[in-house]
Image: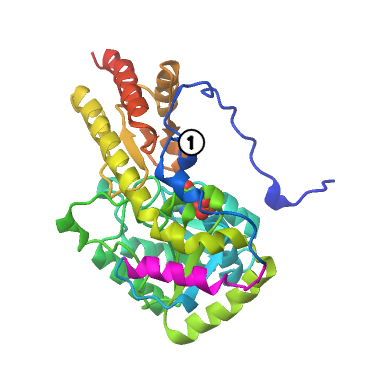
Amino acid sequence: MTYFSQRTCWPEAEPDRSAECPFDLTETNPTRVGLVEPERIAALIQGVVAYDPSSFGAPSARLAVSDYYRRRGHALDAERVVLSASTSEAYSWLFKLLADPGDVLMVPEPSYPLFDCLAKLEGVRLAPYALRKEDHFRLDVTELFRRVADEPAVRGIIVVAPNNPTGTVLHEEDAALLEQGARERGLPLIVDEVFADYLDVPAAMRSRLRSSFASSNTALTFVMSGLSKVACCPGAKLAWTIVNGPAPWRTVALERLSVVADTFLSVGSAVQAALPQLLAQSDAVHVELNARLAVNRASLNRACEQTQGAVRVLPSHGGWSAILELPRIVTEAEWQARFSAEGVKVSSGALFDIPGGRSLVLSLIVEPTLFREAMQRMVAAILPLLT
Ligand SMILES: Cc1ncc(COP(=O)(O)O)c(C=O)c1O
C-alpha cells in the first residue's frame, strides 16, 4: 500500500560528499556570487500592489516584455506574451497545453537536468535527441526528425539556446530546417532562451546563428525566458512565454493557455508593476555579468594551457557554464573527488548526460578571484597525474 503517486516516487538522492568545498564551481544562483547590479535592480520590487488579476498578466508588464524584444530587433505584439512565475512553471503549463499523460516531448541531450522532474510531474515522457560532442553539440536536424519518426506519441520539440551546459545556439540554416520540419509534421517548438543575453560569439559569426526565435512564425513556437537569468533575479518570480506561429494555431494556443494561466494566476502584483523598470535596467546586469564571464573564461583557458593540451574546454556560444574534457587517466567521479580534496567543487558531466565519462561542468558566474584560485588548485591536482 502507498499513500503517494508514482509521479513523486524519485530515485534516492546521492549523498553530497563535497559539501564543504570553499571553491564552489557548481554555484549557479546569481544572488550568491556578489553581483552588484542585480541587487540594485531587485530593490525596485516594492510593496504589495492592488490585485487586478488578468490571466496572462498586467498589460503594462506584457508590454514591457515586448519592448525588451523590440530593443533586440524583434517586433512583437504584447498580446502574445504570457507571464508565469518561472520558466519551470511555463514548461508545466506548456506540457499541460500540448500533451496528455504518456505523450512524448523531444529533449536535447546533453541539457538541463530538471527536464526529467518537470516531465514526470506532468505525467509525460521524454525522448532525447543527441547533440553530439564530435559536432560541437550542433543540432543534427535530420537525426532529430529520424528520432521523431520512431516515437508515435510526440507532441513537441524542446530546444534550449544557448543550451545548458553546452552553451550552443542553433546555426541559422539548422533553425530554418527545424521550423520547416516542425510545421510539416504539425509539431510545436518550445524554445528556452533564458541565457540569450549571455552570448559569447564574434560579431562576424552572429548573423550565422539564430540568436532568438522571438519573431519566428513558421511553426507553432513557444519562446521562453524570464527574470531569473535576464535580470539575475530568480527570487523575483517572473518569467514569460511568447506564443508565435501560423494564425489559427497561435490563436487556439493562446485561448487554451489563458485557461491554464487563469487557473493559477501565479505572478505577484509587485513584480509585474516593477517589470518595465526591471527590464529597462537589466542591460547593466548583462554588461556586468558578461564582463565577469569573459574574465573567468580567460582564466579557464590559461589553466588549460598549463596542462599542455591534456585538458580542454569544449567550444561554446555562451551561457553560464563551461565543459571541461579531462584525460581518461581516472574516471569522472575520481576527478571530482580529487578536485574536492583541493577544496574545489564541480559538477559531473553525467549530471547533464554528457557521454564519455570524462567531462566536468563549471559555473562561470562565480567571483573571478575565487574562480582563478579554483583553477590553480585544479591545475595543481592535474599536473602530477600527467607525468
Ligand atoms: C535552460 C534553463 N531553463 C530554465 C531554467 C530555470 O529558470 P526559472 O528560474 O525561470 O525556472 C534554468 C535554470 O538554470 C535553465 O538552465
Q: Amino acid at mark 1?
A: Arg
- What residue would you read off at disc 1? 32
Q: Residues within 10 Å of mark 1 (few under 14, many from 20)?
A: few
Up-down relation of residue 232 to residue 324 (above or below): below
User: Which residue is located at x 37 percent, y 67 percent?
Assistant: 69
| Residue furthest bottom as drawn | 248
* x and y percentages locating residue 78 in the rendered image: 46, 76
Q: Which residues are magenta?
A: 51-71
Q: Is residue 233 left or right of residue 314?
A: right
Which of 281/224 is in front? 281
Which quadrant does the C terminus fall into? top left
Any magenta on residue 77? no
Note whether ligand 1 is within 8 Å of mark 1: no
Q: Please name the residue shown 41% across and 18% down the image.
A: 338
The percent position of residue 324, horizontal first and vertical second, equals: 32, 34
**Quick check: 154 left or right of 174?**
right
Q: Is residue 188 visible?
A: no
Badge 1 marks a residue whose secondary structure is helix
Tell which of 102 and 235 is nearer to you. 235
Check residue 58 for magenta coloring.
yes
Q: Position of residue 340 (x, y in %)?
A: 44, 20
- Residue 199 visible at all: yes
